[in-house]
Each structure stands twice: as structure tokens, then as C-alpha cells.
Amino acid sequence: MGNEMISIKGTKNGLVIVLDPNHNFEDIRKTLLNKMESSRGFFKGAKFSIFQGSQGIPDNQKNELEDICRQFGLVLNKDSHTAHIKEPTKSPSRSPRIAPQTNNGEAALMVKRSLRSGQRIVYPKHIVVLGDVHPGAEIVSGGSILIMGSCRGTVHAGAHGDRTAKIVARRLEPISLSIADARHQPDRTGANAEHCQAARLSGTRIIFEKFQPGR
Amino acid sequence: MGEVFVITSGKGGVGKTTTTANIGTGLASAGKKVVLVDADIGLRNLDVVLGLENRIVFDIVDVTSGNCRLRQALIKDKRLEGLHLLPAAQTKDKTAVSPDQMRTLCTELKKEFDYVVIDCPAGIEQGFRNAIAGADKAIVVTTPEVSAVRDADRIIGLLEAAELRDPKLIINRIRPKMVRQGDMMSIEDIIDILAVDLIGVIPEDEMIVITTNRGEPVVLDQHSRSGQAYRNINRRILGEEVPMMSMEEDGFFKKLRKIIGLN
């Protein structure tokens, strides 16, 4: 499974390409190449670092992978080594990890009610709403937005430019929905299909899809 | 000790004043002692709808500013023994009364009356804040239009912020035929958005216009459907369990009964 072999995650310090060193190097190389080709320049200009868990891979192999990334316009992040060195001492677990904060989850604002028209929540990190977001209500989050009820209001995730931000709701029928600098205004007449429970950014387009746990 | 209801909506023209007049008149005809308070200072209508316009001597601003005693300003209804009106001032504006003064006024009125029903002005500014200041419970009126429902939602949010929780909803001017054709929001749609308890649905009815112009609330008209709908609301306020009336032979309102849990 390619997904397990390589996963690309966005962090504050740019992209982190996480490898599973238990796989054959040649497979890893091919998967990375495939991923970069299928991304069609989406990662261009992004800082990146390669992280391969606690075991590590030989330097020549690592250099080869970095070269692949450079070919697709990525820029190597010089600080990447610190992440590599710190990790094994901090956590005894062997599974690949990016940064300590991801292990423990990330801070989010919990809103324990429904938001009615005219009510507005602005928060620099993730926002979780234990209720509905009614038409005329507004949520602006620096990170992702999770709504346990229906989302019928105006929602903006990744307001400070986080393009990995997602919007997930039990029913996603917003008046308008934005992620980073992309904006989507659904037709008033056409209700979103039942399975559209999550929105994320793919390139410059917002795509709606069924929510898949763990992704 | 009586109870203070505020009738509010956010949007104008959805039927706050008509509803206030009909709830007040209905409760009074059920033998309760009721006072209606017109909080729409500067745009008073409630006296006209009740047909009491020509009896006004003092108004709410005279009472709150100490120009007269409360008893002097209260107008007794010409038909019903228990019904009274405290009219709004017409030559002043909303800032002539403060929320504190309204709270004091409501406390006074509660001592003497079983029900105090406040007719709230449209909007969310000082007039609204005055009207809800002394209220114990709120009734939100809306019509099956997106704009009215949106405003009702805003109002419910503001009521919650003012510690007036669980308001009851009246859906006014519904046209079952249009709902069936999919041209009008259904009761289910509205409840789904607003997420509050329904206390009644008033069908669109020409009799409302006729009775309003005559100054005789429709609730006293035994033949009209809207009058029946208001009588049902009043019985629910008095604590009776009344099923939603069927407006169509095919039982369009059967679903409605399920929504509010009355079978």
C-alpha cells in the first residue's frame, strides 16, 4: 500500500514526507515519484523534509529521495535534521511521527451549543461545534472546523492560509465555504448530496467528499 | 404572581401585533386577567388592532417617567372584563424608556395580572432590548419565508443571550397548498432550522385583515380557521394539550402533531 509507505503531511515548518523504512527502498522511491507526478506541481515551492522514523535509512538513499522532491520544485528544509534527532528520545514508540503536538492531538476551541444567525466565532486554531451552525452564523478558524450537527452557515477554515485545513460536518450545506484563499458558494437551489460531509482543498479547488475517519 | 410573555420576531410585518392582540384577547375570554403592553414606542398599533385607539389618555412613557400612575394609563377593553392595554407613546421614540424601567413596570404589572403580554417592535435595537427586559417567556412569530426565519433565528440567539431560553414558535400565514406544491417552506423545514418548540400554526386567512381593520381580534370569531388556530394557542399557553388542527382533508397536519409530540 503506497499510502502507508509514504505520507506527506503539512506542518508549520513545511511538508514532512514520512517514510516507512520497513519497506524496500526501490518501492519507496517509486511511490514517491508517483506521488509527485500525480500532484501536478501542487507542492511546488513548498519546504520539505524527509522523516523516516527511528531506524533511519542510509544517507545516499535519503539524498536520492530529496533529489526527486527537488525535481518537482520542492525546497529542502534545513531544520529537518532536528526533527529527526529529537524524535526517538521523546517517544519510545516506533511508529512514524511528525511532531510531538500531533501525537497528543492539537488544541481546538469547543463550542458547546448551536450557532444562530448573527453569531460569530473566530479562533486561530481548530474549532469544534457541538451543535448546528444556522444560516447567517459565521465561523472563522485558523485550522480545521468540525461541526457535529448541520452546517448551514458561513464557514472559513485555514483563514491564515493553512491549505491543509478541512471542514467536516454531519450535514454540509453551507451558504458559503472557504478554505485558505479558496471560496465556494453552493447554488441555493441544489442541495448537497447526503454523502458530502467533508470539504478539503485539492490544488486551488475545494472538493467535497464523504468523511473518512483517520484521513 | 403573573407571567410576562414577550411576542417578538425580528422582522417586521410577520404578525407580532396581531398575535399579541389575539393571545391577550383569547386569554381574557378564558377568564384570565390580562394586560397587553405595546412596547413599539413611536409606531403604536396595538390600540388600533384592539379598537381602543380613541380611549388613550396616558401612555407607557407617562408611566415610566412618572407623569401618571400606572392605573391611570391602563385602558379597559370594551368587550372583555379582564383585558387591559398599556398603550405605547406615539410622539416619543424607543429611547424614552430604559430596560430597567421596563423591568420595574413588568414587576408591577405581574402583581396584578395573570398574564402580561408585551408586543415587541421589529428590529434588534433598544426597542427590542426594552421589550424583553422584563419578560419571563418569549414567543417568536415567523412566516414561512427565508428572510423571516433567518431573523427569527437571530432573535432566538439574542433571547438566549438574555437568558430567555426555550422560546415557543408561532408560524404565521402558512398556505398548505403552496407547501404541498413545494413553493413554500414547510413547518418541518422551519422547525429543522430553528430547533425550537412549536406552539401553533396560523393559516393565511382573509379574516385576519377584516377583523384587524374592524378592531376586533379574530380569536373572537368562531367560524374562521385562523381564529380557531389562535384559540388553540391560548389553550396551550394555559397548559392544555391540544392537537394541531387539520387544515386539509388529507391530514396535512398529521405530521405536525408528531413534531410537537401530540398524537
Image (spheres, rainbow, N blue to C red):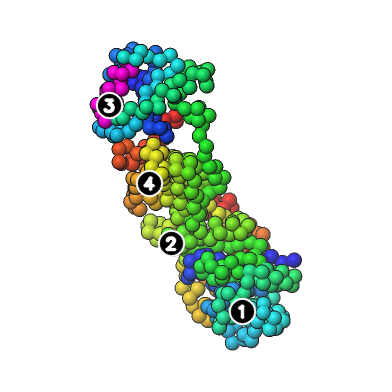
Q: Mark 4 or mark 1, which is nearer to you?
A: 4
Q: Nearer the viewer, residue A18 or B27?
A: A18
Q: Are marks 1 and 2 on the same chain?
A: yes
Lateral position of residue B112 relative to residue A118, left or right: right
Of tags 3 and 1, which is closer to the observer?
Answer: 3
Amino acid carrying label 4: it is Ser
Which three-letter amino acid code belongs to the residue tagged 2? Ser
Q: Earlier in the sequence, mark 1 or mark 2?
A: 1
Q: Residue at x 32, y 15 (%)?
A: A61
* Residue occupied by mark 1: B87
Question: Between marks 1 and 2, how big is the CA–CA gap?
Answer: 29 Å
Q: Which residue is mark 4?
A: A178
Which callout, 4 or 3, points at the residue further toward the start of the chain?
A: 3
Q: CA distance from mark 4 to mark 1?
A: 49 Å
- Numbered range of the magenta stretch: A61-73
What residue does disc 3 label? A70
Is residue A190 depicted above or below B231 in this figure?
Answer: above
Image coords of residue B114 (percent x, y): 71, 69
